[in-house]
């Protein structure tokens, strides 16, 4: 398990990609698409995007959420406490990527917190992947996996192993 050290918290509050105020100007084309976060996933679906993989935790800004997703994706359940990246989450993302590359869509429902799932998603996703995640009170961040892999590797290297 990787544990987020205090010294990286401020760094990870900065967007890892392009910050957009809304979904209005987001074009993912034919890219493999991963969404991270309940609001981001809901907004993507409402804007007609069909994520290959969605990662949610049924919480919005640390509060329980009771919204339902009108989506036909296969559900994978994972456990990931706040401030960590567990082996279970890592394996769930890998399983979803492998299945999605074969044409199936997945929704990973995390018991705990999904915020840091962006990093393993960047590292394991196909080169043409776009990852969307929410930047609280600012908008949505669009990350191109191929352009961000090195940065994600550097960040993960600085996590503590437990």
Image (spheres, rainbow, N blue to C red):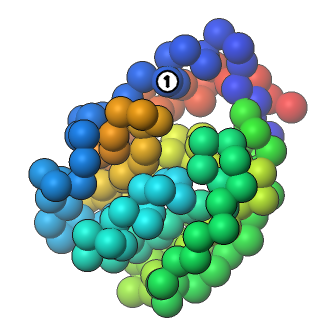
Say whether residue 137 is left or right of residue 47: right
**Residue beneath the point at 52% across and 41% down:** 119
User: Would you say residue 26 is visible in this rendering?
Assistant: yes
Residue 14 image point, x, y percent: 42, 22
**Residue beneath the point at 73% across and 71% down:** 77
Which picture quadrant has residue 125?
bottom left
Relative to 111, say whether 74 is above or below: below
Q: Nearer the viewer, residue 46 or 55?
A: 46
Say whether residue 66 is left or right of residue 135: right
Residue 78 image point, x, y percent: 75, 64
Quarter of the image with the N terminus is top right
Q: Nearer the viewer, residue 100 or 50?
A: 50
**Residue beneath the point at 42% across and 56% down:** 40
The residue furthest top is: 7
Give the mark count: 1
- Badge 1 density bin: few <14, some 14–19, many ≥20, Cα 10 Å: few
Relative to 78, say whether 36 is above or below: above
**Residue beneath the point at 63% across and 80% down:** 75
The residue furthest right is: 162
Q: In terms of secondary structure, where does tag 1 sit?
A: loop
Quarter of the image with the C terminus is top right
User: Would you say residue 147 is visible in this rendering?
Assistant: no
Residue 49 image point, x, y percent: 28, 72
Relative to 25, say whether 10 is above or below: above
Q: Nearer the viewer, residue 15 or 31?
A: 15
Which picture quadrant has residue 55?
bottom right
Which picture quadrant has residue 101?
bottom left
Residue corresponding to mark 1: 13
């Amino acid at each position: 398990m990787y544990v987020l050290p205090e010294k990286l918290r401020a760094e990870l509050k900065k967007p890892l990609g392009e910050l957009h105020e809304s979904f209005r100007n987001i074009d993912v084309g034919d890219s493999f698409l991963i969404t991270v976060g309940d609001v981001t996933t809901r907004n993507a679906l409402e804007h007609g995007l069909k994520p290959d993989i969605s990662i949610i935790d049924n919480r919005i800004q640390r509060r329980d959420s009771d919204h339902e997703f009108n989506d036909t994706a296969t559900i994978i359940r994972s456990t990931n406490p706040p401030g960590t990246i567990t082996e279970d989450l890592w394996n769930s993302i890998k399983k979803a990527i492998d299945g999605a590359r074969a044409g199936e869509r997945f929704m990973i429902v995390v018991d705990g917190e999904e915020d840091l799932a962006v990093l393993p998603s960047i590292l394991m996703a196909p080169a043409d992947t776009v990852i969307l995640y929410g930047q609280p009170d600012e908008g949505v961040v669009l990350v191109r996996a191929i352009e961000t892999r090195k940065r994600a590797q550097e960040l993960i290297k600085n996590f503590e192993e437990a």
